Image: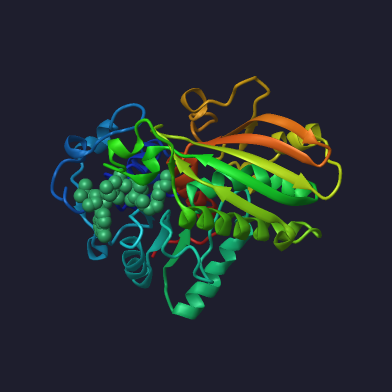
């Protein structure tokens, strides 16, 4: 049997932190052993956390004290999950990696370092080998691995089987994203109630940049076409849902492409986590619905098993012989953040990257 590994969760009281706690409380071999924070240090986790998710704070966790974000106190920790805010995450994660900790980060700060993997385990698992490069270049015993922006994952996961199987020429994406992606207290209610708030050019651009990188890493399996030949664009918005990013994509092809074949490719899509039967891998990373007016954020965001780990795709339509449309729904704080982080950790463990320090 596998040895139980001890995890530290940085920002454990945050909206992604709580999903780590929830998912790891039931995990077969990763235990939430160290809950790190800042303002809540010294207080019992169950008393101060805003548990804005399903269920209740797990009993065995509720009495754990929130502890300082200090690697010196984490001697027996095997893996560090970091969903810290942008800007704060970068230096903290470096400090941990330097000291030999294995860091799985959901934050953007290190995503585009050339020796840092940005992983969706079903899509680009081979990029874990960048860790070897990272350790060599930086002389670190530990490492940093990142997961992509939740918005990018909501599009990149369904686009992967399309990119693998068909000759795509362009993708136009429009998003309607939930509030939890911006944390608590998040956007002022007067800015978001009765509104669809454009996230702006910067957010649109980073969504495109991340999807482009992810697809370029799928390319390894595809002789043609190169991702640079694909025109990608995104228009991103925040709306007043709590969890779940809803995205509409129009995909154009270089040749006539049958929407039913595209649907089959998504339905049968699986990757290494499914082959390896990793505990957090859903049986199907993409669930396709043919029901009219589905998916819906309220009903479908917890789809899959573990709940929230499958992206739901629906409203597939042949627009013309070379254009299709689909919508996707991703649970942003689960598949798009904590769940993706746990699945990435399982992959790293399976590949031998997380040993006893
Ligand atoms: N060092 C240590 N702890 C820090 C910190 C730092 N530099 N910066 C913040 N924290 C702590 C907070 O103080 C808080 O702990 P406390 O309760 O003990 O005071 C804890 O981290 C959680 O706070 P915060 O991260 O603000 O939670 P949130 O729910 O408001 O926001 C995220 C959560 C995930 C949205 C936000 O951290 C974020 O944007 N992260 C980066 C990317 C990401 O994962 N996005 C999710 C997309 S769905
Ligand atoms: Mg906050």
User: Residue at coordinates 65% horizontally, 20% vertically from top-left?
Assistant: 291
Looking at this view, name the residue that lies furthest to the right.
Answer: 256
Tell me if 205 is positioned left or right of 71 in this view.
Answer: right
User: Residue at coordinates 70% horizontally, 40% vertically from top-left?
Assistant: 269
Question: Between 18 and 214, which is closer to the camera in this rendering?
Answer: 214
Tell me if 111 is positioned left or right of 286 in this view.
Answer: left
Residue 181 sits in which quadrant? Answer: top left
* Whole-percent x, y for residue 243 in the image: 42, 34
Position of 108 relative to 157 (above/below):
below
* Whole-percent x, y for residue 65 in the image: 18, 45
- Is any atom of residue 133 visible in this view? yes
Looking at this view, name the residue that lies furthest to the left.
Answer: 42
Which color mode does the image show?
A: rainbow
User: Residue at coordinates 79% horizontally, 58% vertically from top-left?
Assistant: 225
Tell me if 111 is positioned left or right of 125 in this view.
Answer: left
Looking at this view, name the residue that lies furthest to the top.
Answer: 292
Please give the count of numbered marks on the rendered protein.
0
Position of 327 relative to 112 (above/below):
above
- Is any atom of residue 33 visible in this view? no
* Whole-percent x, y for residue 31 in the image: 36, 45
Quarter of the figure with the C terminus: bottom left
Residue 88 sits in which quadrant? Answer: bottom left
* Whole-percent x, y for residue 118 in the image: 53, 59
């Amino acid at each position: 049997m596998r040895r139980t590994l001890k995890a530290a969760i940085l920002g454990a009281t945050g909206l992604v932190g709580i999903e780590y706690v929830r998912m790891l409380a039931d995990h077969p071999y990763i235990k939430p052993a160290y809950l790190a924070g800042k303002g809540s240090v010294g207080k019992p986790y169950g008393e101060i956390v805003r548990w804005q998710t399903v269920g209740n704070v797990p009993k065995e966790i509720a009495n754990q004290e929130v502890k300082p974000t200090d690697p010196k106190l984490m001697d027996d920790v095997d893996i560090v999950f970091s969903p810290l805010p942008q800007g704060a995450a970068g230096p903290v994660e470096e400090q941990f990696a330097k000291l030999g900790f294995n860091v799985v980060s959901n934050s953007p700060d290190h995503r585009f370092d050339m020796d840092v993997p940005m992983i969706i385990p079903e899509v680009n698992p081979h990029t874990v080998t960048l860790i070897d490069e990272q350790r060599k270049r930086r002389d670190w015993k530990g490492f940093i691995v990142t997961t992509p922006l939740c918005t990018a994952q909501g599009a990149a996961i369904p686009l992967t089987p399309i990119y693998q199987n068909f000759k795509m020429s362009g993708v136009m994406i429009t998003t309607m994203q939930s509030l939890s992606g911006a944390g608590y207290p998040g956007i002022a209610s007067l800015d978001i109630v009765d509104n669809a708030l454009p996230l702006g050019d910067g957010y649109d651009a980073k969504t495109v940049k991340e999807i482009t990188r992810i697809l370029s890493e799928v390319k390894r399996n595809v002789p043609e076409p190169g991702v640079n030949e694909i025109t990608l664009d995104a228009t991103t918005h925040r709306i007043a849902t709590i969890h779940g990013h809803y995205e509409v994509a129009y995909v154009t092809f270089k040749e006539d492409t049958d929407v039913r074949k595209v649907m089959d490719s998504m339905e049968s899509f699986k990757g290494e986590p499914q082959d390896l039967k990793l505990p957090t891998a859903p049986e199907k990373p993409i669930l396709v619905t043919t029901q009219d007016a589905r998916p819906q954020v309220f009903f479908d965001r917890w789809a899959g098993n573990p709940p929230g780990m499958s992206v739901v795709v629906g409203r597939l339509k042949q627009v013309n012989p070379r254009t299709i449309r689909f919508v996707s729904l991703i649970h942003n704080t689960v598949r798009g953040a904590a769940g993706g982080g746990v699945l990435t950790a399982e992959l790293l463990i399976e590949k031998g990257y997380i040993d006893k320090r």
